[in-house]
Image (cartoon, helix red, strand yellow):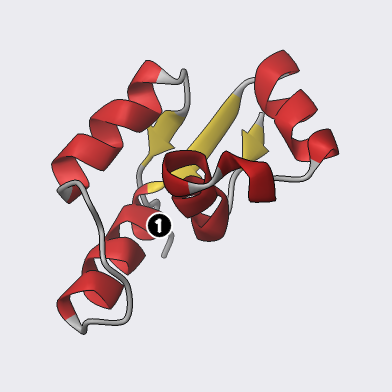
Amino acid sequence: MYLLDTHIIIWMLYDSSKIPANVKQVMMDKKCSISVASLWELAIKSSLGKIHLKQSIEDIASICLEFGVEIIGLIFYN
């Protein structure tokens, strides 16, 4: 499984031409995931006005799932 970075999510949603060909190939051939922390990062940046999202975080999560991208949670160890 491959973990996608936050900027790949942004590019996937708004400008897929920025995604390198080798990353697109991995996304098509392999199981990919994003961390819920990436969605959190998008929400924070949006609330601070650093980025403008056309969809809500909930909609972005749904779109990721529709693309077959799994959303993984945070795991804390003691």
Q: In which image quadrant can residue 73 be found?
A: top left
> Where residue 53 sits: x, y (%)?
25, 58
Quadrant that contains the N terminus: top right
Identify the amino acid type marked 1. Answer: Ser
Q: Residue furthest right?
A: 22
Q: Nearer the viewer, residue 31 or 52?
A: 52
Residue 17, x across and y down, in percent: 65, 43
Q: Position of residue 43 (x, y in %)?
A: 22, 65
Q: Nearer the viewer, residue 16 or 34?
A: 16
Quadrant where the C terminus lies?
A: bottom left
What is the x, y in percent for residue 50?
Answer: 31, 81
x 27%, y 40%: residue: 60
Q: Is residue 53 above or below residue 26?
A: below
The residue where tag 1 is placed is 38
Quadrant location of residue 65?
Answer: top left
- Tell me if 71 is positioned left or right of 4 in this view: left
Q: How many neighbours does mark 1 have within 10 angstroms: few (below 14), some (14-19), or many (20 or more)? A: some
Element marked by disc 1: helix
Q: Residue at x 67, y 36 (%)?
A: 2
Residue at 78% from the left image edge and 25% from the top image edge = 25
- Left or right position of 56 against 46: left
